């Protein structure tokens, strides 16, 4: 039998047992949501509480994970997630090996077995995480050394923008390292493939399961690797087909007028529900097929394999039915909430990111003036201190990306800066652009737009906050500026220095409750934004800004969620999107929401800013 035939037969066997696998998969997943998710939340909240903050962002997350307590917390969280996956797979494998055809009898037998082995399974999960981390750690250290050797002479944005030879050296070396790491991981994982079965069906101690599995898999690893690759490819192909069919169904959404709005919403949610259900069936079938594949490599060697008496899955069944009812209620609430949102006026302000950075060289007076001309409510800039104590507008730590000049901002004087052309890289017509000062920007913006000042820290700041405050007060613009930073202590310092000024937290990633941090607003990566986050931040009396949104569909989606500000490189486009949305009926707004949520294709050319 060929490896492809073996995998296809595994999928057929799993599909034949779909009436067992799918209900068990759904029921167990619901149980895990009730059990594992709170445990993860408790672990994360405990970790965050050690910092005396309600949330950790970016640098604080990295620093915490590198601390002893943070590393332990990360291991626990990873182990909990892995335990959830181990639990689901164990139930599928157990129900397969027990051969029961009734889903509830099979499920109750399998769950009874898993619960009797739960401490051992958790021990297996922890050991698995630690073993994988130990395998990955040397490669991660070497990769970090390569990056340090090749990508730290200049600001990282220079390497990411222009891809100099040293960048490609790093890409090639780290890429080769990743391939070696993948090869090592695949070898070890294929050797450990029977570890879970040994713990589950033979009662082997988790600490011994890995070595015993490696012994039993001798001579079989090559075939397993190929079968796993084929299993994954088949799953991806089936998922792609399901998504294609869903796309065809979404194309039939009836949006001919406001009268059909509820019908369109109901139809769309039904299609989305069918898509989700198909995804669940695929996940259950694929996991069942994986159980069949691995079961083919496992020969039980105990005289009396554990087969608990079938019991009742009444509790999981009740949980499943209850969860389904809750899901229906949530769906109805969500549908009503969505109808309200698509009919409500937008509240978003337009914030020009580094000026109008898509149309003019970033953080130059040309970009600032363009953002003001294009009607930005706010102009967002980055500030640092020079060697002669001047506050200048600059994002990177040096001038390599903007000018090809190897000079750090904190080592530069205004005389140096006067000779550095930071506009020609964008276009020869901007050769006259020089790094502006904060005074230049405030003078240009006064009475025309407000200014968000991002405080940049590279470890060489002297008195950045006080100097910024003095310049703002010199122009009398206390009510027309806001400050923000990726560095949370800087936000706290600004609030302590000027309690009445607007200050906010800038975050690319976060764990915990962002709404509980000090400040008047949070500015988050658009990928982090959810309706729940928007509601929690606004319920705390704060604003939420999203960055960097340059696609009109994404701008519309963020506006539909009720965000307070769109940080964009294209302020004219953002204003056009909001103008068009203001003239749209609910049906058209719903279409834009559907397009973003479900990947539908919508022509947004009319919203695009074609101005040079």
Image (cartoon, helix red, strand yellow):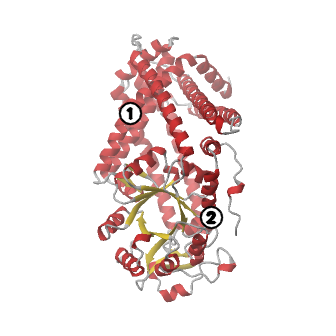
Earlier sequence position, callout 1 versus callout 2:
1
* Residue nearer the viewer, 297 or 374: 374
Instruction: Classify mark 1: helix, strand or loop.
Output: helix
The percent coordinates of residue 590 (x first, y second) are: 61, 42
Which residue was labeled with disc 1? 36
Compared with 177, 269 (above or below) is: above
Q: Is residue 457 something one can see in this rendering?
A: no
Q: Residues within 10 Å of mark 2 (few under 14, many from 20)?
A: many
Quadrant where the image shows the N terminus: top right
Q: Identify the residue shown where x is 65% and y is 45%.
A: 588
In this view, the residue farthest toward the bottom is: 415
Instruction: Classify mark 2: helix, strand or loop.
Output: helix
Looking at the image, residue 252 sits to the left or right of residue 184; the answer is: right
Looking at the image, residue 610 sits to the left or right of residue 295; the answer is: right
Tell me the number on the disc at residue 572.
2
Which corner quadrant of the image does residue 297 belong to?
Answer: top right
Compared with 225, 412 (above or below) is: below
Q: Residues within 10 Å of mark 1 (few under 14, many from 20)?
A: some
The percent coordinates of residue 432 (x first, y second) are: 62, 84
The percent coordinates of residue 265 (x first, y second) are: 60, 35
Quadrant where the image shows the C terminus: bottom right
């Amino acid at each position: 039998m060929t490896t492809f035939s073996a995998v296809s037969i595994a999928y057929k066997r799993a599909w034949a047992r779909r009436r067992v696998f799918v209900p068990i998969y759904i029921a167990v997943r619901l149980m895990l949501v009730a059990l594992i998710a709170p445990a993860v939340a408790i672990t994360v909240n405990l970790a965050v509480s050690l910092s005396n903050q309600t949330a950790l962002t970016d640098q604080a997350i990295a620093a915490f994970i590198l601390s002893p307590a943070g590393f332990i917390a990360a291991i626990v969280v990873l182990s909990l997630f892995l335990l959830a996956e181990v639990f689901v797979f164990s139930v599928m494998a157990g129900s397969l090996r027990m051969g029961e055809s009734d889903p509830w009898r099979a499920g109750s037998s399998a769950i009874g077995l898993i619960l009797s082995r739960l401490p051992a399974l958790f021990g297996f999960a922890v050991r698995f995480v630690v073993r994988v981390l130990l395998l990955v750690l040397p490669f991660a250290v070497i990769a970090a050394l390569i990056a340090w050797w090749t990508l730290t002479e200049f600001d990282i944005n220079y390497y990411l923008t222009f891809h100099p030879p040293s960048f490609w050296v790093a890409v090639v070396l780290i890429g080769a390292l990743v391939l070696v790491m993948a090869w090592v991981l695949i070898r070890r994982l294929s050797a450990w493939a029977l570890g879970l079965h040994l713990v589950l069906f033979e009662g082997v101690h988790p600490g011994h399961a890995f070595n015993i599995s490696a012994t039993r898999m001798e001579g079989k690893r090559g075939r397993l690797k190929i079968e796993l690759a084929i299993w994954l490819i088949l799953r991806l192909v089936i998922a792609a087909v399901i998504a294609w069919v869903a796309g065809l169904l979404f194309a039939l959404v009836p949006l001919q007028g406001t009268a059909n709005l509820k019908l369109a919403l109901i139809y769309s949610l039904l299609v989305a529900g069918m898509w989700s259900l198909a995804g669940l069936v695929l996940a259950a079938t694929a996991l069942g097929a994986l159980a069949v594949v691995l079961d083919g490599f496992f020969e039980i060697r105990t005289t009396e394999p554990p087969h608990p008496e079938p019991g009742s899955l009444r509790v999981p069944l009740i949980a499943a039915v209850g969860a389904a009812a809750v899901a229906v209620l949530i769906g109805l609430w969500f549908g009503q909430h969505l109808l309200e949102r698509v009919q409500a006026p937008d509240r978003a302000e337009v914030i020009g990111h580094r000026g109008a950075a898509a149309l003019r060289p970033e953080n130059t007076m040309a970009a600032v003036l363009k953002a003001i001309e294009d009607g930005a409510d706010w102009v967002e800039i980055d500030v640092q201190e020079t060697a002669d104590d001047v506050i200048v507008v600059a994002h990177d730590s040096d001038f390599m990306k903007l000018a090809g000049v190897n000079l750090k901002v904190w080592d530069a004087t205004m005389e140096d800066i006067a000779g550095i052309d930071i506009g020609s890289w964008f276009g020869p017509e901007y050769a006259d652009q020089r790094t502006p000062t904060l005074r230049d920007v405030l003078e240009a913006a006064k009475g025309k737009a407000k200014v968000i000042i991002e405080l940049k820290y590279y470890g060489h700041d002297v008195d950045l906050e006080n100097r910024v405050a003095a310049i703002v007060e010199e122009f009398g613009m206390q009510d027309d500026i806001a400050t923000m930073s990726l560095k949370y202590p800087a936000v706290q310092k600004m609030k302590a220095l000027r309690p009445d000024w607007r200050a906010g937290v800038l975050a690319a990633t976060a764990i915990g409750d962002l709404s509980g941090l000090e400040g008047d607003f949070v500015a988050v990566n658009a990928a982090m934004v959810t309706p729940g986050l928007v509601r929690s931040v606004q319920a705390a009396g704060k604003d939420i800004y999203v960055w960097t949104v340059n696609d009109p569909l994404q701008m519309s989606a963020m506006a539909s969620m009720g965000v307070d500000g769109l940080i964009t490189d294209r302020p004219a486009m953002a204003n056009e999107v909001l103008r068009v949305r203001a003239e749209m009926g609910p049906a058209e707004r719903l279409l834009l929401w559907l397009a973003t949520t479900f990947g539908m294709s919508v022509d947004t050319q009319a919203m695009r800013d074609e101005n040079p």
